[in-house]
Amino acid sequence: MMNDISAKVRAAGVVGGGGAGFPTHVKLEARAEIFIVNGAECEPLLRVDQQLMAQRAEELLRGLRYGMAATGAKEGIIALKAKYKPAIAALEPLLPANVRLHYLKDVYPAGDEVITIWMATGRRVPPAKRPGDVGVAVSNVMTLINVAQAVDEGNPVILRPVTVTGAVRTPITVTVPVGTPMAELVELAGGPSVTNAAYVGGGPMMGHLLHDLSDPVTKTTSAIIALPEEHIVVRRHRQSMQTVLRVAKTTCEQCLLCTELCPRHLIGHELPPHLIVRSLNYNHVGNPSTLLSALTCSECAVCEAYACPVDISPMRVNMALKAQMREQGLKYEGELRPADPMAEYRLVPISRLLARLAIQQYSVPAPMQADVHRPATVVIKLQQHIGAPALALVKAGDAVRAGQLIGDIPEGSLGARIHASIDGTVSEVTAAAITIRR
C-alpha cells in the first residue's frame, strides 16, 4: 500500500503546493509518527487553503489518510487558524478517530513548517534538521487534495487555484491550468485599481516581486498581489543587496529586537540576527557557529519587515551569507537550545502585521470562483519544484491532451513529472519550458 501510494503520487507530479515545491512522493517514502496538514495559510492576504478546506474537506481527509498510510503515521493533525470557521464546520463532522483539529492563533509565522510542528505537537525541529527527525511529516492542503486525486483518480497536477488580491478591482481566487500567463489572472480580477501597480508573487512577507506578468503560473503559485509602485512592500523588494549591506554596516544600533522576535531563535535555534549583522560591521570577525547559523534562517522576514526600527534587513544579510557558505559547502551543526519562555507571546499578531505593512485595506475576501479559466496558450516550466528540471518528452508540432506526460524526472535525480494542462499543439520546446497552444 505504501509503495503504491508513493508511485501514484510520483506519476501525477505532485509537489508541495505551499512552498518551494518539494516532490511529494519522496516525502511519502519517509516514516513518521504524526502527519500534519498545514492549513494555517501563513501569510496575510492569502485565501486558497482556507477555502479549499471548507469546500473540499472530504478530499483533504482522503489525502491525509493516504499520507498517513504511506508514512506509517498513527495520528493526523489538521493545523488551522481558529478564525477559519467555514473550514472547521466542514471538517469536524468528517474527522476519523485518529485525526484531530489543532486551532492556531492568528499570528505570524503560524504556517512556517517548523513553527506549526511546535505549535501543534510541542516537538521542536533542531536547527538544520527536518521534520522527519522528530517523527513528523507535513503537507499543505493543496498538496493533499492533489494526493487524493492522484491515488483515487490517477489525475496529474495540471490545475492551480490562485488568489488575486490587493489593488485589484475584484479580489478573487481562481483555478487555472498550470502555465497560464499571470496577466490573465489579473484581468479576471478586473485589472489593477491603481495606475502604477506593481505585483508580488506569494505573500507580502516571503513573496517575490513579479517583473513580467507574462510569466506563467506554476504548481507552487499561491497568490498574485497588486500594490501601488510606491508601497512599502514593493520598495522593500526593490532594495538592492548593495544598499542592504551598506545600511546594515552603518545603521545597526544592536537593539536586539530582530533576535528577540526571530521565530526560529524563539524556539531554541541559535540564530541571532543582531550578532550576524554585527559580524558584518567587523568584516565577519565573530563566532564561526554564529555566522553559520545564518544557514538556518527561514527567511520569514520578521526581522526585516516588522522588528527592525531603522530599516535594516538582517534577512537579506543572512541570504547573502547563505549563498557564500553553500558555495563553500559549509554546514551548520549547532544544538537545539532551550526555547524562550516568552516564545508563544512574541509571535506577531496578524492584525499588527497588516498595520505595519500598510495592507489593512487589502485584507478582504477573495471568493473562490467555480469555473476553471481556459487560456489559449500555456507555458509549462520544466522546473516547478526543488531538484532537477524535468526532461521534455515532446517536440514542436506534437498534439497533446490535458493530463498527458510531457516531462519526466531525469534518472537518479530528485524531481517531479510535468503534464500538459490543456489540449493543444506544442509550439515551442526550450531548455526551460514547453509552450502549448489550444
Image: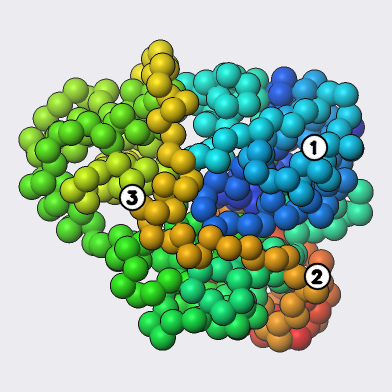
Q: Is residue 390 above or below residue 394?
A: above
Give the camera-side residue of 161 and 400: 161
Distance in Å between CA atoms under marks 2 and 3: 35 Å
Which SS class for mark 2? strand
Task: Return the x and y of residue 67 as percentages of the image width and height.
Answer: 78, 35
Q: Count the labels in the image.
A: 3
Residue at the spot of label 1: 64
* Residue found 25% across the figure and 43% down from its top: 308
In the rendered structure, find residue 82 and report the number of the disc placed on it.
none
Give the label on residue 305, or none.
Answer: 3
Q: Residue at x 56, y 68 (%)?
A: 165
The residue lying furthest to the top in this view is 338
Which one is earlier in the sequence, the residue at label 1 or at label 3? 1
Residues at marks 2 and 3 touching, judged by CB atoms closer than 8 Å:
no
- Mark 1, residues whose alpha carbon is within 10 Å: few (<14), some, or many (≥20)? many
Mark 2 and mark 3 lie on one chain; the one further toward the N terminus is 3
Q: Position of residue 273 (x, y in %)?
A: 26, 34
Q: Of the residues shown, which amino acid type is indicated by label 1?
A: Leu
Q: Nearer the viewer, mark 2 or mark 1?
A: 2
- Which residue type carries mark 3? Ala
Q: Residue at x 52, y 31 (%)?
A: 115
> What residue is shown at x 88% (from left), y 54% (from top)?
154
Q: Position of residue 32 (x, y in %)?
A: 70, 23
Q: CA distance from mark 1 to mark 3?
A: 34 Å
Residue located beneath label 2 in the image: 370
Q: Is residue 82 left or right of residue 302?
A: right
Instruction: Work out whether residue 46 or residue 379 is closer to the camera in this orientation and state it.
Output: 46
Q: Nearer the viewer, residue 13 or 370?
A: 370
